[in-house]
Image (cartoon, helix red, strand yellow):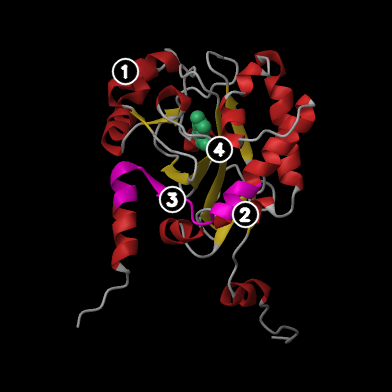
Amino acid sequence: MSWSFHDPDEQALSRRFLAAGYVVLPVEDLGALERIRALLVERTCAWLDCAPPAEPQGFLDHIHQRVEPADLNALRVALIGALNAASWARPAYYALARRALTVLVGNELAMQRRLNLSIQLPGDAGSLLPLHADVWAGDSPFELVLWVPLVDCRATKSMFLLPPAANARLGAALHSFAGRTVEDVYRSVEPDLEWLEVRYGQVLVFNQTLAHGNRVNQEPETRWSLNARFKGVFTPYADKKLGEFFEPITLRAASRIGLDYRLPGGFDE
Ligand SMILES: O=C(O)CCC(=O)C(=O)O
Ligand SMILES: [Fe+2]
């Protein structure tokens, strides 16, 4: 008999994640995903004043036939508001990848307080996220991103990620791009980028310290995806603070005791 601190399946998942910088997994709670999608479809219909679609995925894939690029941000803001106003939405989102997050991040988690929604119409350059790592702009390197598509995503309908080895080379060379553009950086790493294929019913967890982003969607369908960040609640914070940007979601009894504990005082010496 030999003992290990790690369950072999969990160890395999961690190794895969560390090697690739991401994992794509089946959603752990399909009902939760369907409920989130149904809320967004229903609110989109209310915003467009149209009848509920017979088939949600085709409706979302082809929303560019009903929404002009100029109106997209207003729709997106309305949908984010509606989603975050539903008290069940964040627990449901967490349920999509509870086990994977426990293995990859921990069992005492802080979760981003607002779910983000991204909608990328074909050919629209209006809402792009050029190459970046979240950690370059105020995120902690202890955070992972849970990214959940509401439609099947591939190629430029999806997002790109720079694998760890190429990302390390970029990190060593990044200073030499001072005074040049993000587009220059993008071109230098373009051959190494991986475009992540993630279908409806799957989740993506990725390492946001690796360079990533998106380009103009050249597919004939609209991309819809949600994202939110998770970290160990006691791991270091950067600009995005606990209570403002993050909220503890799974504190355990021992931590509650520890956080509340005060040594008996009132002694004179
Ligand atoms: O959805 C995308 O294309 C990029 C998402 C991203 O940058 C993030 O979630 O940190
Ligand atoms: Fe990002």
Task: Answer above or below: position of 265 versus 59.
Answer: below
- What amino acid is labelled 1 in the image? Ser
Task: Answer above or below: position of 194 versus 122.
Answer: below
Q: Is residue 205 magenta?
A: no
Give the mark nearest the N terminus, 1 or 3. 3
The residues bearing labels 1 and 4 have C-alpha atoms spaced at a distance of 31 Å
Q: Percent x, y for residue 101?
A: 47, 56
The residue mark sitting in front, 2 or 3, is 3
The label shown at residue 92 is 2
- Contact (CB < 8 A) between labels 2 and 4? no
The residue mark sitting in front, 2 or 1, is 2
Q: Percent x, y for residue 40?
A: 68, 38
Disc 2 under 8 Å from ligand 1? The reply is no
Q: Which residues are magenta?
A: 16-35
Residue at 66 percent across and 77 percent down: it is 261
- What amino acid is labelled 4 in the image? Leu
